[in-house]
Image (tube, rainbow, N blue to C red):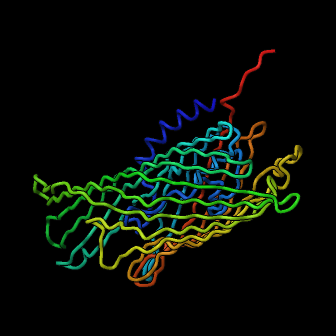
Amino acid sequence: MIKKIIISACLLISFVSFAQQGTASPYSFYGIGDARFKGTLENRSMAGVSIEQDSIHLNVDNPSSYASLRQTTFTVGGSFGTSTLKNDAQSEKAQRATFDYLAVGIPMGKLGASFGLVPLTSVGYKILNDNTDTPGATNNQFEGKGGVNKVFFGLGYKIKPNWNIGADVQYNFGSITTTSIEAITGVQNATKETNKSELSGVNFNIGTMYQTKIDKKMMLFTSLNYTFATTLNAHNVRTIAVDGDPDPITSDPFDAKLKMGNKVTLGAGVGLPRKWLVGTTLAFQGAGQFENYYNSSDDVRYEKYSKYALGGYYIPNYTSFTNYFSRVTYRAGLKYEKTGLVINNESINDVGMTIGAGFPITGSFSNVNIGIEFGKRGTTSAGLIQENYLNFSASFSFNDRWFKQRKIE
């Protein structure tokens, strides 16, 4: 059954991931868009804390975790988000529904493998500068869509019962299209400029996880992950058209190289397996070089990224037969991120809180997860925009045994 689900979902979501507009943020104009993927919902509901060697939940943040799987796991997630965008003078609301990830994990003894598809970044904005009440004034309309996706394949290996190592390879690909229309009040013809950038690149990720007892019941969990710096190749084309002119001007294609800095993520925590866990995750990434010809500005620069998260889960009684809600996993977390984007000398930061729950499907190890994330990003200082966001997410994690030896008695 799970094989049919995987095939059907892969076909559907592969199409949806290209068609969707995964953000409504004006900040997605810069670089390669908003960072989309922040872990599977189980980890995202704990603000990104992912330090436990889980046997039934897939952790795609650290490839060494694949070695701890005990059943083939298929997971898929999506979100519905609403946000209020405001500056000193006005505010607007925006909504979007998005596909977040699809991944499969396969246990093979001491070895574990995983592959999947993840929207990595998204561009999605519409900005209107309306001066139609002023004769001779310039009116502008800006729109952007697209983003970067990644497909990955990774392997994890269990060196010892409490120590895993792993690595994965990721292929990043996608396209970003931006359109700007300029018109002068009282002048009939407008000018339209379209820029399209095709992006591609490969990067690598390695990780390790270690856990040990610190008393008869309590465990210490640790995680370390390193993502190598990589280059995204951008193939760019610009087209300029004027109303009434049947022959738009298309520039010769030209290439650019965008750079993503190396990233290190480390985490640690304590807990009682299948009961509770409290942990923290820290992430640091070198400053990227994301300026392309259509979104560079003297007022914009990129600094080092960092994230600080605290989160955990609680299960009242995972073996309860009489009370279903005692088997539910309750999750929560807090986060603070420096996104790495600096506009008008103001760092664009993200502060948020997450809560969620995992509901087991009776008679199996599969589960349904829901999560809520709320917070704010950006600031109204220096003429910028503050985003107050609220995201509702859901995911399904299906578990099955694929490689089991049949016995005839």
Image quarter of residue 302: bottom left
Percent across and percent down for residue 116 are: 52, 44
User: In the rendered image of this protein, does residue 133 appear above or below residue 70?
Assistant: below
- Asked if residue 137 can be seen in this view, the reply is yes
Residue, x 34% and y 62% (percent of image)?
258
Taking the image as shown, residue 386 lies to the left or right of residue 134, namely right
Residue, x 30% and y 68% (percent of image)?
295
Q: Residue furthest top?
A: 409
Which one is nearer the viewer's eye here, 152 or 192?
Answer: 152
Percent across and percent down for residue 42 are: 66, 54
Percent across and percent down for residue 141 are: 28, 67
User: In the rendered image of this protein, does residue 217 appear above or below residue 156?
Assistant: below
Quarter of the figure with the N terminus? top right
Which one is nearer the viewer's eye here, 120 or 111?
Answer: 111
Quarter of the figure with the C terminus? top right
Percent across and percent down for residue 201 are: 38, 52
